[in-house]
Amino acid sequence: MDQLRFTMSRFGDEWQSLPVGLSGLGVFPGPPAILFAIPVVTAALLDRQVALTAALPDLSVHPHYRPGRWVPQVTLSGPLRYPEAALAAILPLWRPVEGALAGIDLVRFRPVEILASHTFG
């Protein structure tokens, strides 16, 4: 855990805010399903994920989070047994969003618990 916190803090100090756009919606199929927003995947975003993974070579990483397999996403829901209702509610309101990644969190989940946070720069 100390190595994770150290690495997160190091990158948090080195990295600056990263522009990001959310371009669409997706669903990780279930049950239960998870609704998410899809960021525009850029080389800079993928480079950060590769750098984090490379900095922690002894860490056991779930295959979903390995470079080349990671699906960048912004989780919008908890587990949904019937995601159709959530999609029906959000689709009429959905518009692409422009923003920035301004920090990094170390989380444990299920359930989600933020263990540490660091603002970039």
Image (tube, rainbow, N blue to C red):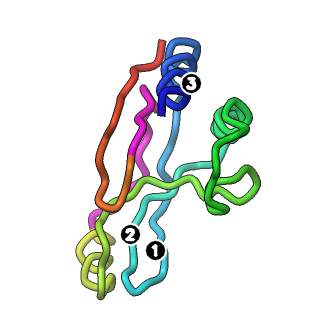
Asked whether disc 2 touches disc 1, contact meaning CB atoms under 8 Å apart, the reply is yes
Residue 11 in which image quadrant: top right
Q: CA distance from mark 2 to mark 1?
A: 5 Å
- Tell me where residue 56 appears, x and y as whole percent: 67, 34
The nearer-to-camera label among 1 and 3 is 3
Magenta stretch: residue 43 in it? Answer: no
Crowding near the residue tagged with mark 2, few <14, some 14–19, many ≥20 C-alpha atoms within 10 Å:
many
Residue 43 in the image: above or below residue 75 = above
User: Which residue in the protein does label 3 denote?
Assistant: 7
* Circle 3: residue type: Thr
- Tell me where residue 111 appears, x and y as whole percent: 29, 59
Instruction: Depth check: give the residue in front, 72 or 51.
Output: 51
The dominant secondary structure in magenta is strand
What is the number of the mark on residue 35?
Answer: 2
For the point 56% across and 24% down, the residue is: 7
* Circle 1: residue type: Val
Crowding near the residue tagged with mark 3, few <14, some 14–19, many ≥20 C-alpha atoms within 10 Å:
some
- Tell me where residue 25 appears, x and y as whole percent: 45, 66
Secondary structure at numbered mark 1: strand
Along the polypeptide, which appears first: circle 2 or circle 1?
1
